[in-house]
Amino acid sequence: MQALRRLMQEYKELTTNPVEGIAAGPINEENFFEWEAFIQGPEGTPYENGLFRATFSFPRDYPLSPPVMRFSTPMYHPNIYPDGRVCISILHAPGDDPNGYELSSERWSPVQSVEKILISVLSMMAEPNVESPANVDAAKMYRTDRAAYAQHVLRTVRSSLSL
Amino acid sequence: MEDDEFEEDEGIQDEDEEIEEGVSPIVSAVEFQVIAPDQIRDKQEEIKAQVADVLGLPPDLCQMLLIQFQWNKELLLEKFMDNPEKVQAEAGVIVAPPPPLPAKFECDICCCEFRRADGIALNCGHLFCRECVRGHLENAVSQGPTCISTPCPHSGCPAKYPEPIFASVLGTGKFLEKYNEFLRHSFVEGSHDMKWCPAPGCSFACISTGGGTACKCRCGHLFCFRCAAEAHAPATCDMVEKWTMKCNDEREDLTWITGNTKQCPKCHIPIEKNQGCNHMTCSRCRHEFCWMCRGPWTEHGSETGGYYKCNKYDPKKHDDPYAVDAKNQLTYYVHYFERYTGHQQSQKFASGQLKKAQEKMVELQSRPGYDSQRAAFILQAVEQVIECRRVLKWTYVFGYYLKDGPEKNLFEFLQRDLERTTEHLSELSEAPVEQIDRMELVNYSTATRKFLHNLMVGIENGLSR
């Protein structure tokens, strides 16, 4: 099975050559189609020092279709829906652009991977895309009142650390 | 096609010929060419070959360029002459052959190793295994029409898959069929002289070769080439759009009530019209009246001289002691709307009569002296009624937007003529077969066609004598 082999390969790659600030793997090794990931808030951003958990659900035709990524830690971010789903171009198939702002070169393609998604998420945390917000309130606050935005994020960071 | 036995019909026979050839004052078949899906393909190949000839590139790559330019050949050639590199890059076309490919490679999608022969690469040189490319392309096809410019899976690679790769990788089956359908659609929708027939389930396309707008598809549907609505001469596309919006704006109950029911002028029971003819007989009190103006039917005979004169809007008829402008406007609208819906329903009813007409034709053919051609007059009469009803319906939209003046008077005169003969022809054509007088029906068909012609020509000439 193509999807399973590919997921095992990615898991192996992520454990042998880990990327700083991210860790990911199957929640349960019996089921390779549900993963969890931990992301360290990038330094110099309001997310700094936070540790955020997200889950990945892979479709049976992975990597032809992209996985769904969802934060299980509460997140306050312009490109994350209040229910935790991440709205980022790399997770959208070409031709499927709900907000109409993305270039097809940034889209999902079968050579993308969990690692590439997580790296994109890290840069999204540092630089939100306010052109196509999933959380309109967060986007508005990010644009108009950066200090209040940082304050809001800090609260989520604290709760991610259970403080 | 003259018949010696029936010499008196000679002139009319000639007229019959005219109908058979599909020449009518409104639909001129010469201006449109109807083409089936495989002929669309031929047209596509033709344009591809023309572009390949000019640019000196392989036809399949030219197709990619044409897709990028929505099949606008002229624009493509112009832009290509300006900046060929840019046009090629945007279309995902790489003309240079790929770099040397390794004998063995790992497919980045499934992470397995393959021999070069088992892989597929575009001129960008990114090799993937055949199975993964198939999955990638099938996935793209299920995403929709954008599949006709599917990029190479390699991250950020601009190269796009041309048609032959789809054909060879997808083999035969529903994915390739779907891909070809999307390709055809992009071609027809991109070509400004081509339109899909808007009838549900019809797969023909029509090509305009002249300046006409009323296009008759091979499936029988008659539509406006410009706005894709039903053919609506003499009303213009603008009028139709405004009219449709207006009709949607009016309260729906008003629309339904005025459009579908009327009270019997004598016993006031609400009556819903379920036949084509305007000659109504109340099922309760047997009162006979005209559906349009609700006047007694007796006033509509030829002996009174004022028959069928119900297409004229007479403000006195709708007088109201508290008449205000808005009220007048509504009454004005309702006057036209009622007649519009009246003809619309009659058109529908007449379309339903087509099957009956065919049955009558079969019945008639069992009689001596009638072959299928001589019996065809029944069907032709019903077709004539349908055409006239459709045109009459739109004349009320045209009339609604026509300002008062001598033009309007002439228009209403021509409209009245057509309405009168259509009404009569409608009644004659609905009669049971034993009551049908061939001569009468043929003569009325001819007369009706003449009045239709007069109306259309009159409007075309600006309604000035």
Image (cartoon, coloured by chain):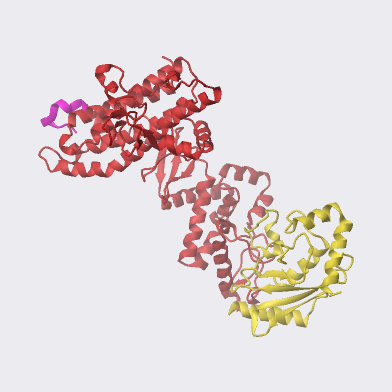
Q: Which residues are magenta?
A: B1-13
> What is the quadrant of the C terminus of chain B in the image?
top left
Query: Extreme front residue here?
Result: B267
Using the image, determine if residue B177 lies above or below residue B338. below
Quarter of image, res A154:
bottom right
Q: Going by the image, does A159 lie left or right of B280? A: right
**Majority secondary structure of magenta residues:** helix
Whether residue B224 is visible, yes or no, is no
Residue B237, image x, y percentages? 50, 33
Q: Is residue B102 left or right of residue B382?
A: right
x and y, in percent, of residue B91 in the image: 63, 54
**Residue A83 position in % (x across, y down):** 71, 66
Colour seen for chain B: red
Taking B295 as reference, is A4 left or right? right
The quarter in which the N terminus of chain B is drawn is top left
* B174 or B239: nearer the viewer: B239
**Residue at the image point whose x is 41% and y is 46% from the top:** B35
Give the drawing colour for chain A: yellow
Q: Closest to the observer: B166 or B245?
A: B245
Give yes or no for residue B4 being in the magenta stretch.
yes
Q: Estimate the x, y position of residue B357 in percent, counting from the top left.
A: 24, 41
Residue B464 or residue B54, whichever sits in front: B464
State whether residue A113 appears in this view. yes
Residue depicted at x 48% and y 26%: B331
Q: Is residue B77 above or below residue B211?
A: below
